[in-house]
Amino acid sequence: MELKKRIEKFKTREFETNKEFYLGIEKGQNPHTLFIGCSDSRVNAEILFQARAGELFQIRNVANIVPRDDDPDNNLSVVSALEYAVKVLKVKNIIVCGHSNCGGCAAIRKLNDYKDDLPNTAEWISQSSRISDYIDGKYPDMNEDNKLVLLEKLNAVRQLDNLLTYDFIRQAFDSRKLNLQAYYYDIGTGDISIYDYENEFSDLIKEIALS
Ligand SMILES: [Zn+2]
């Protein structure tokens, strides 16, 4: 369907049918969750959470990466959204969602293949190359498919550690005003695994941080 027809349909069907709801959210937002997901078109936060407009503040980028606070090339797009979500909107949850068959994570495994044609992408995703190197070192006999899945999961969990490099996030987390979780969405099965920062993979993440 033509895009213009779709937005006309939004107005005539969705908006007109739910006009009261839209007037209710017109003046401001009060989202409960900051969703940090991959730019991948198959990852749709509203569908996954059965959420309506106004519930999810979102950051989307290639391979759902949060640059660390001490990163010299700090990415203002990500950091400003983090600041606004935590300091102003005071979201209760931050969820970093990795997913299966992630092209960004697959590219982390073959970084040199992308450096010439996609230099910006290669530089961006290289922030997570440490995790990929760690997997190679720790599991030399694992097959490539399983390494990629592990990278997709560990990459999501690792971003929780990256989030905690920001003082304002650390403070909110330590005072229990903010929950941090990593999700892994398997597109082919519809299964979503949930990893708490303190539990799943936390030893691996600490090892990566020290390596
Ligand atoms: Zn992806």
Image: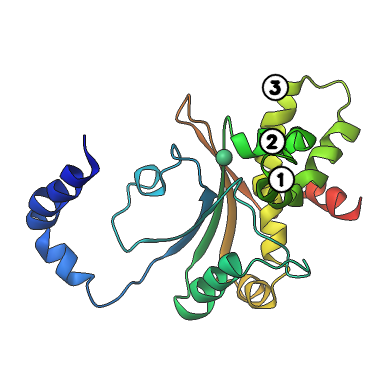
The first of marks 2 and 1 along the sequence is 2
Q: In 3D space, how far apart are the residues under numbered discs 1 and 3 (Cα atoms)?
A: 21 Å
- Labelled disc at residue 107: 2
Question: Where does residue 138 sit, x and y in percent of width and height?
Answer: 88, 34
Q: Is residue 131 left or right of residue 196?
A: right
Nearest to the observer: residue 113 or residue 183: 113
- Secondary structure beneath dot 3 equals helix
- Labelled disc at residue 145: 3
Q: Which residue is mark 1?
A: 122
Q: Amino acid at mark 3?
A: Asp
> Is 43 above or below relative to 124?
above
Give the residue displayed 65% in from the left and 66% down from the top: 75
Q: Amino acid at mark 1?
A: Ala
Q: Is residue 152 left or right of residue 52?
A: right
| Quadrant of the displayed image that contains ligand 1 | top right
Q: Which quadrant holds residue 210?
A: bottom right
Find out whether the residues at labels 2 and 1 contact each other: C-beta distance under 8 Å: yes
Q: Is residue 163 left or right of residue 28?
A: right
- Secondary structure beneath dot 2 equals helix
- Quadrant of the drawing holding the N terminus: top left
